[in-house]
Image (cartoon, rainbow, N blue to C red):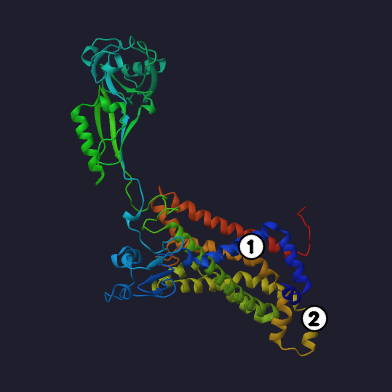
């Protein structure tokens, strides 16, 4: 550290001290660098290949070296072995001293998991959900029932006894319903009406009475139909029966005792069948009340929610989301760093030439830059991707040849300002070569825009890669990518883990980058304390 301090000039040391004084930026830099280093070590932390294998007295390191299947099984196959199957095989288990050490997360970003490997509870839940009763009555202008269907429950009598009964004697109809019925008998157009009313016979009972839309006819109707729907069902009335095997569980809900023997046998048969295949929902009637039966079991299908061993869930191809996010961080950071360095080098060289030589050189290059910047980046990306195929290198090249333009403007302005200063004129008088003046004397004094823009350009490149992957024009599948997880989440919107965890990762990285950029900008600001007034 002392050696570094001796090599750096006082101005640079002052800027480093000012950067460290801004704790938010300093710790963001440490965290982001730490995350990137962890992502670079991803094969040692998250991999479906073991770190170390001891088999028949020999040591193997599959995470560093490729070994064919023939090296372990003698099968003659040169394909990659299934190390988990090898660990479970009889020769490996029987051999004394054989062992296999996997990384802390034994899943790779490209590994497609088998549904049987997911630990889920093997149980079937039968739910009894009460179904609200629905009935219909037709009344005349005096509100006397002339016809009914399944409405006896709402009047406390058998359905056959409803004819001739007055509606007002059983239910307290509000004025809204009276007016709606009157409009229909008057053959006037009327909108649909839905009201919750209280029973005149039992004040604790309520029902929803509705009238459909009415359009005028050639003559007035003789009767008006009202639909009754039971309300106020207690959600706690829902009961469930949990099967953990084919046998009847020890604890059964009260509804089970009220079922007939035939209903019980049918229910047991359906529950046993649900262990192997889906079973359709059905409806049964118990003591005159209807219940909807649903047979629920956790089936492993991709994508799958977070479970033990896969804490961030599984994507729609059966791959571990945590592994995809970790390797996606490495890809995004590497892509961003390479892209920003390349684009800044290009922009610095071209902007330096423009600013130093000025005149005709500056004018010509500036017109060429304006023409080049008018080209549609996305169309060129689509065209080259369709011709050469999507790849990491192609994406870097296409992005790099467009991204340098912005930094060239800053460097051009800095060189135009510095080329007339005294130390540049003195170097020219001493006969210093042009390239030495540009890169030795002017450039070190013009690097402030490059350094301050570096963190912001980095997070911009990471965000751009995620957007391209989301649109399908980025890295080729099955490369781990945050944008590709966002695209999966759009296809299966109920899989919240496919959008939540990649979003958190992208948000954290961008936030850390912005904090770092803010700290660098303040460190290079010549005014220690400034504010806008």
Q: Position of residue 176 (x, y in %)?
A: 41, 18
Residue 263 image-quadrant placement: top left
Q: Nearer the viewer, residue 362 or 166?
A: 166
Answer above or below: position of 417 versus 178: below
Whether residue 90 is visible = yes
Image disc number at residue 423: 2
Residue 353 image-quadrant placement: bottom right
Residue appearing at x 37%, y 56% in the figure:
316
**Which of labels 1 and 2 is toward the front?**
1
Q: Position of residue 333 (x, y in %)?
A: 54, 66
Residue appearing at x 43%, y 57% in the figure:
321
Answer above or below: position of 29 versus 183: below
Disc 1 residue crowd, few under 14, some 14–19, many 20+, Cα 10 Å: many
Image disc number at residue 314: none
Residue lying furthest front: 96
* Quadrant location, the N terminus: bottom right
Answer above or below: position of 163 versus 375: above
- For label 1, the SS is helix
Q: Position of residue 76 (x, y in %)?
A: 27, 77
Residue appearing at x 22%, y 42% in the figure:
273
Q: How far apart, in angstroms, are the residues tagged by discs 1 and 2? A: 35 Å
Whether residue 220 is visible = no
Q: Position of residue 18 (x, y in %)?
A: 75, 63
Q: Which residue is mark 1?
A: 29
Q: Nearer the viewer, residue 135 or 126?
A: 126
């Amino acid at each position: 550290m002392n050696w570094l301090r001796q090599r750096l000039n006082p101005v640079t040391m002052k800027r480093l001290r000012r950067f460290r004084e801004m704790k938010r930026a300093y710790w963001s830099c440490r965290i982001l660098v730490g995350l990137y280093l962890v992502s670079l070590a991803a094969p040692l932390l998250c991999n479906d290949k073991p770190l170390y294998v001891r088999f028949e007295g020999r040591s193997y390191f599959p995470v560093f070296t490729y070994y064919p299947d023939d090296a372990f099984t003698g099968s003659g196959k040169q394909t990659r072995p299934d190390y988990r199957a090898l660990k479970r095989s009889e020769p490996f288990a029987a051999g004394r001293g054989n062992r296999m050490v996997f990384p802390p997360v034994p899943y790779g970003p490209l590994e497609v998991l088998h549904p049987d490997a997911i630990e889920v509870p093997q149980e079937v839940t039968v739910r009894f959900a009460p179904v609200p009763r629905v009935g219909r009555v037709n009344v005349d202008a005096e509100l006397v029932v002339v016809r009914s269907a399944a409405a006896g429950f709402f009047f406390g009598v058998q359905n056959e006894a409803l004819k001739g009964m007055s509606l007002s004697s059983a239910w307290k109809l509000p004025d809204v319903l009276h007016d709606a019925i009157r409009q229909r008998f008057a053959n006037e157009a009327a909108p649909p009406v839905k009201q919750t009313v209280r029973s005149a016979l039992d004040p604790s009972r309520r029902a929803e009475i509705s009238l459909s839309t009415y359009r005028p006819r050639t003559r007035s109707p003789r009767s008006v139909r009202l639909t009754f729907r039971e309300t106020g069902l207690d959600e706690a009335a829902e009961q469930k029966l949990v099967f953990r095997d084919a046998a009847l569980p020890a604890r059964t809900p009260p509804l089970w005792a009220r079922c007939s023997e035939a209903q019980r046998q049918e229910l047991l048969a359906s529950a046993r069948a649900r262990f192997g295949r889906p079973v359709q929902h059905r409806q049964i009637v118990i003591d005159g009340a209807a219940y909807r039966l649903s047979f629920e079991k956790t089936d492993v299908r991709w994508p799958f929610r977070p479970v033990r061993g896969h804490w961030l869930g599984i994507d729609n191809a059966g791959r571990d989301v945590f592994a995809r996010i970790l390797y996606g961080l490495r890809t995004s950071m590497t892509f961003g760093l390479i892209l920003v360095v390349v684009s800044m080098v290009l922009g610095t060289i071209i902007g330096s030439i423009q600013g130093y030589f000025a005149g005709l050189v500056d004018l010509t290059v500036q017109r060429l830059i304006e023409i080049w910047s008018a080209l549609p980046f996305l169309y060129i990306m689509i065209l080259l991707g369709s011709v050469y195929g999507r790849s990491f290198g192609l994406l870097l090249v296409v992005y790099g040849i467009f991204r340098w333009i912005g930094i060239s403007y800053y460097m051009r302005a800095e060189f135009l300002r510095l080329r007339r200063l005294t130390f540049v004129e003195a170097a020219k008088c001493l006969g210093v070569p042009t390239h030495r003046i540009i890169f030795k004397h002017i450039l070190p004094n013009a690097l402030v825009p490059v350094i301050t823009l570096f963190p912001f350009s980095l997070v911009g490149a990471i965000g751009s890669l995620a957007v391209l992957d989301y649109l399908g024009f980025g890295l080729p599948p099955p490369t781990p990518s945050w944008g590709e997880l966002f695209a999966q989440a759009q296809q299966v919107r109920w899989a919240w883990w496919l959008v939540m965890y990649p979003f958190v990762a992208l948000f954290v990285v961008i936030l850390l980058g912005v904090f770092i950029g803010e700290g660098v900008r303040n460190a290079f600001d010549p005014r220690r304390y400034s504010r806008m007034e």
